[in-house]
Image (spheres, grey):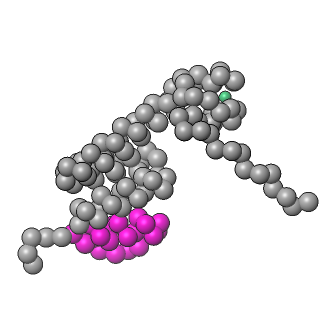
Amino acid sequence: MDHEPPPAPEPAPGQFRCPTCGARQDWSDVCRRCKCDLSLTVAAHRRRSQLRTRCLAHLRADRLDAALSAATELHALTPDDDATRLLAVARLLHGDYAAALQLLAGEKLDLPSVRSGHGT
Ligand SMILES: [Zn+2]
């Protein structure tokens, strides 16, 4: 018998899964089932949402330094696919092509940093 159990269904948008007991629920500081303190999880989720929104607003307004800063903090907090793509875009628009490629390749290549300059 090498059947794996089917993956648990993803929580609906606006919900999450308690990291302790796995109960699906709305965002709350206390788990509805196991009463675990989830305030740090909620705070991290809130911060992630703020950083993502801020980064996109900076990109829209062509504030590339601020966008890169927000994307870097977002990626440090939650290094998931979405944060990785956002950081790669920020690095590309900032002119750091090698760092963007390294990030997307998911490995540390020992390439020199390539930055755009004003004239050569
Ligand atoms: Zn729980």
Residue 60 percent coordinates (x, y): 24, 51
**Residue pictured at 34% horizontal, 50% vertical:** 71
Please provide the residue range marked out in magenta.
96-115
Quarter of the rendering occupied by the C terminus: bottom left
Q: Residue furthest right?
A: 1
Relative to 111, 81 lies left or right: right
Above or below — where is 86 with respect to 32? Answer: below
Quarter of the rendering occupied by the N terminus: bottom right
Q: Can residue 65 be seen in this view?
A: no
Residue 115 percent coordinates (x, y): 21, 69
Give the number of callouts.
0
Q: Nearer the viewer, residue 36 or 6?
A: 6
Relative to 42, 96 lies left or right: left
Above or below — where is 9 with respect to 99? Answer: above
Quadrant holding ligand 1? top right
Q: Can residue 59 be seen in this view?
A: yes
Q: Does the magenta stretch include residue 98?
A: yes
Q: Residue furthest front?
A: 12
**Residue pictured at 54% horizontal, 24% vertical:** 28
Residue 65 percent coordinates (x, y): 21, 52
Residue 91 percent coordinates (x, y): 29, 61
Q: Does the magenta stretch include residue 34?
A: no
Q: Which residue lies furthest to the left in this view?
A: 119
**Residue pictured at 25% horizontal, 52% vertical:** 59
